[in-house]
Amino acid sequence: MQQSLRTFYILVIFFMLSATIQSKPFDWYRGGHITYDVQKKHDAVVDKAIALFASDMQAVTGEKAKESDNADVMVYQLNSITNKDLKVLQNLNVPIMEFIAKKDAFWLGVRNGKIYIVGANGCGTAYGVLELSRMAGVSPWIWWGDVKPMRRNRLTIDDQFEITRAPSIELRGINIEQSNFSTTDYRHLFELMLRLRINVLSAGWDSGTSKLPANRTFREMADSFGIRTVLPHNGNVLRLHDHKKNTNIDITLHDDGYGYLMPTNNELENSGGLVYHLCVAGQPHDNLWLPTTAPGLIVNELHTAYIHGANRLWLISINNPKVLAYNLSLVTDLAWNINSVSVTNVNQHLQTWLGEQFTPAVATRLIQPLEEFIRLTTIRRPSMMDFSQQTSPSTTNPTGDAGVKNTAFNAEEFGNELERYLNNYQDICNSIDKTAELVEESNKDAYFATIQYPVHAASLMAVKLLQAQESRLIGRPASFHHDSEALESAARSMKAYLALEKLNQYYSDSLADGKWKNIVDNTPRRLAFFGKPALTDTISEQEITQYGNNMRIDAPLEDDGCLVRQGYEYASGSKGATEVSLLGRSLRSVTLQKDDSVVYEFQTGTIGGVLRLAFVPLFSLDGTSSECSIRIDSLPPTTIIINDGSQSERWAKGVLRGQSLVELPIALPSGSHTLTIKALNDHVAIDQWMIDRDVNRHFYVFPKR
């Protein structure tokens, strides 16, 4: 027995030592130039990638990468390879058969002290080259995001390193709409698309007209970056044009509804393609200003689309890539590898991405305030803070602007939910500004555009509109200029408006030495709520100075005796119940498929009132109403409708609120109770619920953190 144990331990030590000996780092850069060699025959897109790589290496090392016969980096394109080069790769045991038949795939690995990049085709080869840039610390957002890589004296790779990569989605596209983005110079846009592995470009495909140039120069440039363009075509069929082969490809599309999948009549299974809106204009309300589609919603819906057959083409509708850096990166990561982000680790993906743009230390400091930002913008998107619903366009009102209305935030409920919402915004503004001290000077512009601008802009918009509302509710025309309370709220609102104007001006005129002048639209479609706050009367500069220095109003959370639970706080659930990070106001909504259920346990005294149930406004995948059964204790279940199978008023309210709210009367004796929620169709997400004695309560936010 002792001899056997001794032999076992010797073998363990031997294998551990073998692993240590077999795998060790080696320097692929340590001073001088990084060199590369590309097989003689290759596509133009490979040249584009090599040029970017050479420039990237200059940013990292101070010297551009150069071509050399005895190179550090060897680049091959399989569909144009010679027999001689193919034999070289076979002798190096490159696993060619694993990826040769996969479009846009590549293998990257180390052999004999050199890095080899082998692509199945031109785009795959180009993606492999730019993968090496990423490994060297160069963000795809180096130009668009002003993200400067860290200078390095040494670049190291494991001498046993190798990866094989192939896209989950064959056609990965963007559709640019409602944008100030200049379409006169596409070079930088194509470079970003190449870095993000996007291979389709559209501009207004569904209007029957396209904003893309139709000239030969544009087509040739698109070809050189491996990008197909979309032909204008009405209906739900996308017509792709391959310029090289002069052929068209038609793909049936499934459209979404403000980020929520909205299939009808099994359309999803039959589509093959998906249009997903990170930005959208129209009813019930424009969402064109800030990047506020919750990452958890993006991941949950795109995973759902992929599983149910919309897995050949994804067309992501955006207004400007500059504004949507993280959300666009998240979508393209999923399109490239659907398993790169799961619904349970969306927050980890966000933190990793932040670390790549700035540093891991900055990312660690940012993740909590940015999660809070996602929560606050899920409560109300800044672009919908006017609490109005746009109407059908007309000749006199082309945007259907319905003006500014009072919000549902109530300063008299739950310890002043209005001021608490504003305080929460101020807290994250303070946090991200403090973290800015850790950001390298060369990345201050990137940090401002990606982090500080959207958070501060959303906060200022909330202050402007909510404080204007407070002032209107307090002040009367006859006494407004003698009412200090009304004037204080009015001054806060006006100061927020002026601060937002200043913030926008800095972005347009000064950021990155004016690089982004006029490229970002800070008041898209000029809706009323972007203008001066609607006050009882005009407030003077003297009044702003006199009344605008009021201190923060503390608003500690009070539940007023309500019983409140987050969706994830269930006692038991069926196997299909899945918690999705960064989804819903709870940031941890629970998704259910048909016949899945969760059970909540709670205790109450004798209580009567209303049960309020909040769901993420998802749609049933079969085009019918999204429904659940609700059961209290052993009472008969009640069927409720979460969302209709069409663009109804119920759907519109869910989009605007970020929640589908359902209310049921309730009366319970004192004691222990259970609440069982069962999905009657696929694609249901529980966010929050509460039992409230006050059936007529006017409020907006469940009193729960």
Image: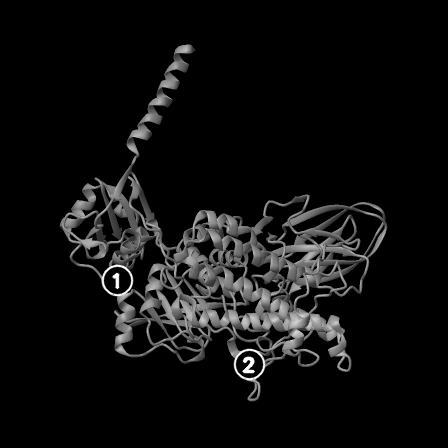
Q: Is residue 10 above or below residue 626?
A: above
Q: Which residue is denoted by mark 2 in the rendering?
A: 399
Q: Is residue 540 above or below residue 92?
A: below
Occupied quadrant, residue 519 = bottom left
Q: Position of residue 94 (x, y in %)?
A: 24, 44
**Residue 144 visible in the displayed image:** yes
Which residue is nearer to you in this view: 226 or 120?
226
Q: Amino acid at mark 1?
A: Lys
Q: Position of residue 530 (x, y in %)?
A: 57, 75
Q: Which residue is denoted by mark 1 in the rendering?
A: 48
Q: Position of residue 697 (x, y in %)?
A: 78, 64
Q: How is the image coloured?
A: one colour
Q: Which mark is residue 605?
A: none
Looking at the image, is mark 1 or mark 2 earlier in the sequence? 1
**Residue 627 visible in the displayed image:** no
Report helix, strand or loop for mark 2: loop
